Image: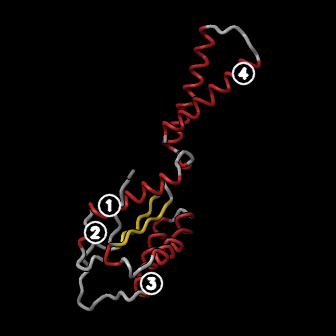
Amino acid sequence: MPWKAFALSASLAGLVLVAIDAWRPQWITSYTALVHATAILAAGAAAALLAIFVPAFARLFLRAARRDVEVRQYAQSLFLTRGLFGTRDRTAVLILISLFERRIEILPDVGLHGRVSETDWQTVIARMTPHLRGSRPFRALEEGIAAAADVLAARGFRHAPGATNELADRPIEERGA
């Protein structure tokens, strides 16, 4: 995102300087050219730094289609690298909250396909979304776990007596992913 912010700001600064020169023509000296180049690069650098340090500004340069694909790919990668597919009945569920993209992705294992619909998972996401919008990601995760448990119970999934939990009951938190 920083390179997009740099490119846009440098282009806009260049356009402004061309417009000023057209409005008020004067002889272009090497000093004037240097001042213009410095202004263009400074505008680009300032925008790039803003994109690095202010996530809301950086999100302006993120296309929705790319955001959705990237979050989905990350969820699939995390599912595989953490071995979440290794449960006996293949019934693991990954609930991913991507803070930068402000997106929730739910990835169920193949043992749930056909038994839990996409609409069911969308209801889980709908219960989580207000908390994520309110900058309460941990509350969103709690709500997501509760909602997923409700959906699974409604579809006939029950905790069998004597069954052990095959996956750790702790969140996976990764920075900058």
Pointer 3 and pointer 4: residues touching (CB < 8 Å)? no
Residue 132 lies, in percent from the top left, at: 52, 65
Q: Position of residue 48 (x, y in %)?
A: 51, 36
Q: Are marks 3 and 1 in contact (CB under 8 Å)?
A: no
Identify the residue at horizontal 72%, vertical 10% (top origin).
26
Q: Earlier in the sequence, mark 1 or mark 4?
A: 4
Query: Which element is circle 2 on?
Result: helix
Look at the numbered disc 3 and give the secondary structure of its residue.
helix
Give the mark nearer the N terminus: 2 vs 3: 2
Residue bearing mark 1: 78
Q: Is residue 88 left or right of residue 26?
A: left
CA distance for labels 2 and 4: 59 Å
Image vertical order of residue 39 relative to residue 104, above or below: above
- Amino acid marked by disc 3: Asp
Q: CA distance from mark 1 to mark 4?
A: 51 Å
Q: Residue 20 bears which disc, if any?
A: 4
> Would residue 37 appear left or right of 171 to someone viewing this image?
right
Q: Residue furthest right?
A: 23
Q: Which of the marked residues, 2 or 1, is nearer the chain's N terminus? A: 1
Q: Which residue is mark 2?
A: 84
138 or 19, nearer to the observer: 19
Amino acid type, mark 1: Leu
Q: Which of marks 4 and 3 precedes in the sequence? A: 4
Mark 3 is surrounded, within 10 Å at the Cα level, by few (under 14), some (14 to 19) or many (20 or more) other residues, namely: some
* Among numbered discs 2 and 4, the one appearing first in the sequence: 4
Cα distance between the residues tagged 2 and 3: 21 Å
Gap in angstroms between the C-alphas marked 2 and 1? 8 Å
Residue depicted at 39% across the width and 82% down the height: 115
Q: Find disc 3 in the rendering and name its residue.
A: 150
Q: Crowding at label 1, few (<14), some or many (≥20) Cα neighbours within 10 Å?
A: some
What amino acid type is highlighted by mark number 4?
A: Ile
